[in-house]
């Protein structure tokens, strides 16, 4: 019934357009040098940003829901597919080696991987696959509890992923440093976490209140 609910098409359009726009917008924040090269006519092609796709998709969905008067949560059912897509995408990043900007910094740790230049590097893509697998397992284990507050599972997923990228990207080269030496994506993650935190806290508080009522009732 959810797929056939009124306004579903608008939400889908909002998701796709938002993700497409956010994907490129955050990439250009991360790599303004590519944007400048494109403006000068250089034969370069913009890359993609998973963070931008997620945030753009979220904004697009919320705008579509607002325009069509919808209030129901739509994100929880997407957590599993998004996790699978992220993990699969990172497999491609790892196999791309130095041709992909997601490879890690040099390391002397025993699990460092030579990406093709003879330098052992952090396998950052594999780290992310492991993190996503763990995050999905935790959310799946708690799905019965989280389901009491629609939307909470997605909020926790997105917050955890943004925090991971904020911290985990410190193991990747920073192409264009911003304030504090952070990359553009790290700053986007930090700002998004600050903006999103009140919504996550409010939903978590609702779950706490429900559990408190159940405890008192029993």
Image: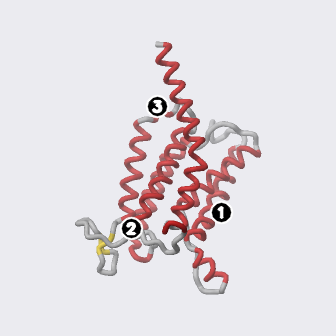
Image quadrant occupied by the N terminus: top right
Q: Mark 3 points at which residue?
A: 144
Q: Mark 2 points at which residue?
A: 94
How packed mark 1 is, by other alpha carbons closer than 10 Å (few <14, some 14-19, many 20 or more), is some
- Name the N-terminal-most of marks 1 and 3: 1
- Label 3 with label 2: CB-CB less than 8 Å: no
Give residue 117's quadrant in the image.
bottom left
Q: Callout 2: helix, strand or loop? A: helix
Q: Left or right: 121 with respect to 24?
A: left
Q: Callout 1: helix, strand or loop? A: helix
x, y (%) of residue 17? 67, 58
x, y (%) of residue 53? 58, 59
Work out which residue is located at the far left of the displayed protein and give it.
110
Is 118 above or below relative to 190?
below
Q: Left or right: 101 with respect to 114?
A: right
Q: Left or right: 208 with respect to 123?
A: right
Q: Callout 3: helix, strand or loop? A: helix
Q: Report the front residue among 73 and 88.
A: 73
Q: Which residue is drawn at 40% across and 76% down?
A: 98
x, y (%) of residue 32? 59, 75
Q: Report the front residue among 179 and 72.
A: 179
Q: Distance between the residues labelled 2 and 1?
A: 25 Å
Q: Residue at x 59, y 85 (%)?
A: 43
């Amino acid at each position: 019934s959810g797929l056939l609910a009124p306004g579903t098409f608008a939400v889908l359009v909002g998701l796709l357009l938002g993700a497409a726009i956010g994907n490129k917008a955050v990439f250009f924040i991360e790599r303004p040098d590519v944007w400048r090269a494109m403006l000068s006519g250089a034969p370069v092609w913009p890359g993609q940003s998973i963070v931008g796709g997620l945030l753009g998709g979220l904004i697009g969905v919320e705008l579509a829901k607002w325009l069509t008067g919808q209030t129901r949560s739509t994100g929880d059912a997407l957590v599993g597919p998004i996790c699978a897509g992220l993990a699969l995408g990172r497999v491609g990043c790892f196999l791309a080696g130095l041709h992909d900007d997601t490879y890690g910094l040099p390391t002397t740790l025993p699990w460092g991987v030579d990406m093709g230049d003879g330098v052992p590097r952090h396998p950052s893509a594999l780290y992310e696959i492991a993190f996503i697998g763990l995050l999905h397992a935790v959310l799946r284990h708690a799905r019965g509890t989280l389901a009491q507050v629609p939307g909470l599972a997605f909020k926790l997923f997105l917050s955890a992923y943004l925090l991971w990228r904020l911290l985990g990207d410190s193991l990747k080269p920073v192409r264009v440093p911003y304030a504090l030496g952070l990359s553009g994506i790290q700053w986007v993650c930090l700002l998004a976490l600050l903006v999103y935190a009140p919504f996550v806290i409010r939903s978590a508080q609702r779950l706490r209140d429900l559990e408190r009522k159940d405890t008192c009732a029993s």
